Amino acid sequence: MLTLLASAVFAQTPAPDAEFQALRRRLERAGFEVRLSPPPQSGAYGQLTVKTRMIWIHPIVFDLHIARPTLIHEATHAAQVCAGGGEIQPLGLDLEPINYARPFFFHYQHPQRRDLEREAYAVQTQPNSYELVMALLDKHCPGGKP
Ligand SMILES: [Zn+2]
């Protein structure tokens, strides 16, 4: 028992879970590349580069156990890119993020940028965030369906 627990505690970086993998495959079918390496923007856990449709996920998110919400956040931005036909645009979601997420997007001065982040934080903090982002990808990136 102790041995098992100890090996769990000292396990190496946990493998991505099934939903992370399924969402990654869904994004790749929609023409996005998901790269598990530090994003160009220093200090970011995740980043989407609109022009190249590259999604960067910092490997540290697996140790921090925030890999799933981080990918869901970037996947919301991916749906925004599909909705804008290659340019990023808000989806017009009628969703508000939980209050403690407000400092993470409220500092954006540009109203559209703030709207983009408000939607991404709103989706990632919903109880059904995974199903929701999958539905958004199906709606806005339909060409990526199998
Ligand atoms: Zn964002």
Image (cartoon, helix red, strand yellow):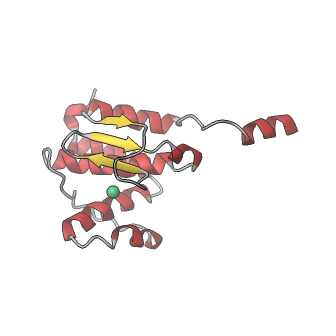
Q: Name the side, left or right, on which 33 lies relative to 11.
A: left
Can residue 1 be seen in the rendering of this structure? no
**Residue 99 picture quarter:** bottom left
| Image position, residue 70 (x, y; %) | 43, 50
Name the image quarter holding the N terminus.
top right
**What's the residue at 21%, 46% (across, down)?**
50
Residue lying farthest to the top in this orientation: 146
Q: Tell which of 111 and 144 is nearer to you.
A: 111
Residue shown at 65%/36% (left/top)? 12
Q: Is residue 79 left or right of residue 84?
A: right
Residue 18 as seen in the image, left or right of residue 22: right
Q: Image quarter for residue 114?
A: bottom left
Q: Look at the picture and state if 131 lies above or below 142.
A: below
Image quadrant for the C terminus? top left
Residue 9 position in % (x across, y down): 73, 42
As drawn, is 60 to the left or to the right of 142?
right
Identity of the residue drawn at 26% across and 47% down: 79
Give 27 or 136, whichever is nearer the viewer: 27
* Ligand 1 falls in quadrant: bottom left
Specify the farthest residue to the right: 2
Residue 6 in percent (x, y) is at 80, 39
Please say if 86 is above or below 102: above
Residue 27 visible (yes or no) = yes
The number of numbered discs placed on residues in the rendered structure image is 0
